[in-house]
Amino acid sequence: MIAVRWTVAGLLAALFVLLALGNGSIAFRAFVLKQKAPSWIPLIGGVAGAIAFIVVPIGGLWMWAWIPLLLDWGSIPGLMHTALFWLFVVPRLPRDG
């Protein structure tokens, strides 16, 4: 059973790293380099990382399961950016009609 937990945690952690790096590069291109960038993948990476922290058989690591949700641009940071954009930028845009 321990081997299964390590395997599942490892796969989920790899998915988290892959998606977090992808989402981070998209955010970097869009906000720092001011280039056109594809859309990011919301929540999947951060949730995979959080589940990996919960599943891995290391005592007490589950308490840190929120960290991947902060590190992945597609999770809390991206959703906060989207919410702030819709609350403060969209209402100020000129309306046609």
Image (cartoon, helix red, strand yellow):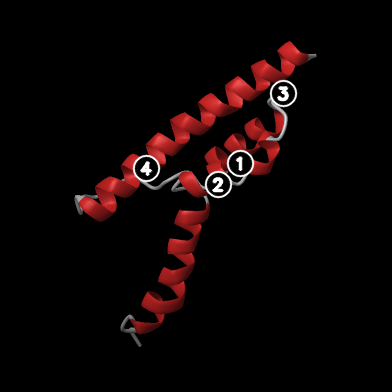
- Residue beneath disc 4: 24
Label 3, residues with CA under 10 Å away: few <14, some 14-19, many ≥20: some
- Residue beneath disc 2: 69
**Identity, as a three-letter code, of the amino acid under mark 2:** Leu
Instruction: Name the outermost residue toward the bottom.
Output: 97
- Residue beneath disc 3: 57
Instruction: Name the outermost residue toward the top.
Output: 3
What label sits on residue 26 in the rendered view? none
**What is the spatial separation of the Cα atoms under label 1 and label 3, in whole angstroms?**
18 Å
Q: Nearer the viewer, mark 1 or mark 2?
A: 2
**Identity, as a three-letter code, of the amino acid under mark 4:** Gly
**What is the spatial separation of the Cα atoms under label 3 and label 2, in whole angstroms?**
20 Å
Q: Are marks 2 and 4 in contact (CB under 8 Å)?
A: no
- Residue beneath disc 1: 47
**What is the spatial separation of the Cα atoms under label 2 and label 4, in whole angstroms?**
13 Å
Tell me: residue 82, above or below residue 42. Answer: below
Disc 1 secondary structure class: helix
Q: Nearer the viewer, mark 2 or mark 4?
A: 2
**Identity, as a three-letter code, of the amino acid under mark 1:** Val
Q: Nearer the viewer, mark 4 or mark 3?
A: 3
Q: Quadrant of the C terminus?
A: bottom left
Q: Are marks 1 and 2 in contact (CB under 8 Å)?
A: yes
Q: Identify the mark nearer the N-term, 2 or 4.
A: 4
Image coords of residue 22 (percent x, y): 39, 36
Disc 2 secondary structure class: helix
**What is the spatial separation of the Cα atoms under label 4 and label 1, in whole angstroms?**
16 Å
**What is the spatial separation of the Cα atoms under label 1 and label 2, in whole angstroms?**
7 Å
